[in-house]
Image (cartoon, grey):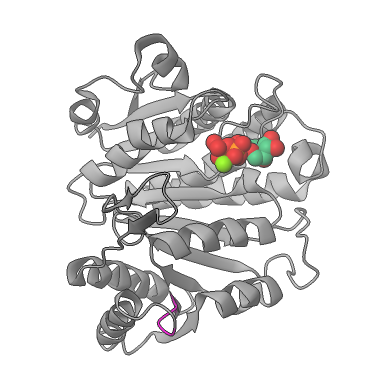
């Protein structure tokens, strides 16, 4: 059965890294008979500048017919961030109930981490970020604008169903890894929502007696991820905490150019979306220097989700191999190879491996 992927290359280096990914996926497909089909959409800040909208009015309906979404990056100088966020990314995450944001982090052999504590191979953690509720709600407002007593209120929303399903996902994921979950909290300072989070996580933990778990306050946890990143396996966090921790952990790993992410609807009712963590990188766009690894590792996550575990594992091995060799590393990870060089090396590895 052909599985179809909606491809949204987006802006800046988005189209460059997505083209690289397509080339490598095609090579994998030839070898493994993955039977993947693609349709490409020009939804982007460029489209916004021309038409006033990031995507057409029936965009979500169109995407709902696909098995997965592969996104490069959206955003461009002059177009406010909220346009690409609220005009494309957030509607997709919400409409398709992609309540898990998965951010694996590794320190690769060959990619220097800024930390001496992070030995290559030893750091291998996943941040599981709650992706649809929590602190990023639209509930709140600003009153008395311009007056001395002006104030702003922003509400967080934590639901039993929402915390339950993200906790379950994290515990389940840990089972297939090193069996250890750390829950990010701040229930000593935030006295309603996070004690509730802690309570629900503890309740769910009882259903996974084979998984070790603990909780850490976000401030201490951030420090520990810097000091002892190899201590962690699965870190589960609310929307805001997960956002911060995954960027922090990706920085610990050495380059934003290698960091992948998946926005997942674990029920499989809707398509999940796979995208590199990095943005459109206007400073290097069009120069053939973009590191395609963040996108390709996102494709590994996509292939796993589509049931192509073997192809996914081969692609991951190929990625690790190219990063080890300075001749097949882009400048952001200390090499001088171009996007095309890395792509060619990956194609050769997956075709011959
Ligand atoms: P956005 O607002 O879309 O997140 P940004 O400018 O804040 O964009 P990025 O676009 O991720 O963030 O760029 C941050 C820095 O990292 C830039 O200097 C960029 O060149 C670099 N960078 C990002 N992605 C890559 C990549 N794939 N390869 C090489 N360098 C990258
Ligand atoms: Mg940014």
Q: Is residue 133 left or right of residue 331?
A: left
Judge whether residue 268 can be spotted in this image: yes
Estimate the x, y position of residue 335 in percent, counting from the top left.
81, 40
Estimate the x, y position of residue 310 in percent, counting from the top left.
44, 51
Estimate the x, y position of residue 16 in percent, counting from the top left.
58, 24
Q: What is the quadrant of residue 175 in the picture?
A: bottom left
Q: Name the quarter where the C terminus is drawn.
A: top right
Q: Tell me the quadrant of ligand 2.
A: top right
Estimate the x, y position of residue 308 in percent, counting from the top left.
37, 47
Q: Is residue 189 magenta?
A: no
Q: Is residue 264 left or right of residue 105?
A: left
In magenta, the rendered stretch is 183-188
Q: Name the quarter where the N terminus is drawn.
A: top left
| Image: 134 above or below 145 | below
Say which residue appears at 46% left-offset and 25% top-offset. Answer: 9
Say which residue appears at 26% left-offset and 80% top-offset. Answer: 200
Say which residue appears at 64% left-offset and 47% top-offset. Answer: 256
Say which residue appears at 47% left-offset and 72% top-offset. Answer: 234
Q: Is residue 128 left or right of residue 192?
A: right
Q: Nearer the viewer, residue 191 or 92?
A: 191
Judge whether residue 329 can be spotted in this image: no
| Image: 321 above or below 329 | below
């Amino acid at each position: 059965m052909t599985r179809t992927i909606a491809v949204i290359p987006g802006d800046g280096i988005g189209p460059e890294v997505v083209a690289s990914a397509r080339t490598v996926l095609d090579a994998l497909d030839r070898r493994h008979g993955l039977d993947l089909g693609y349709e490409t959409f020009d939804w982007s800040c460029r489209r916004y500048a021309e038409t006033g909208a990031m995507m057409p009015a029936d965009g979500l309906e169109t995407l709902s017919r696909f098995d997965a979404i592969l996104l490069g990056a959206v955003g461009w100088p002059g177009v406010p961030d909220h346009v690409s966020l609220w005009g494309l990314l957030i509607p997709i995450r919400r409409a398709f109930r992609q309540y898990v944001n998965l951010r694996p982090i590794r320190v690769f052999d060959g990619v220097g981490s800024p930390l001496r504590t992070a030995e290559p191979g030893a750091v291998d953690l996943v941040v599981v970020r709650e992706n649809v509720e929590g602190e990023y709600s639209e509930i709140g407002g600003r009153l008395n604008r311009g007056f001395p007593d002006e104030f702003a209120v922003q509400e967080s929303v934590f639901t039993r169903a929402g915390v339950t399903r993200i906790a379950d996902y994290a515990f389940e994921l840990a089972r297939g890894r090193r069996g250890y979950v750390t829950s990010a909290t701040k229930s000593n300072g935030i006295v309603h929502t996070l004690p509730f989070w802690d309570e629900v996580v503890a309740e769910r933990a009882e259903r996974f007696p084979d998984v070790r778990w603990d909780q850490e306050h976000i401030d201490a946890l951030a420090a520990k991820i810097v000091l002892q990143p190899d201590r962690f396996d699965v870190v589960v966090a609310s929307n805001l905490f997960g956002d911060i921790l995954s960027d922090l952990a990706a920085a610990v790993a050495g380059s934003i150019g290698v960091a992948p992410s998946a926005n997942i609807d674990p029920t499989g009712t809707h398509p999940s979306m796979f995208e590199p963590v990095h943005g459109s990188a206007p400073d290097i766009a069009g120069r053939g220097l973009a590191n395609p690894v963040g996108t390709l590792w996102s494709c590994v996550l996509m292939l796993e989700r589509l049931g192509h575990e073997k192809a996914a594992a081969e692609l991951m091995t190929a990625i690790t191999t190219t990063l080890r060799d300075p001749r097949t590393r882009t400048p952001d990870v200390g090499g001088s190879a171009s996007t095309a060089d890395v792509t060619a090396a990956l194609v050769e590895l997956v075709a011959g491996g």
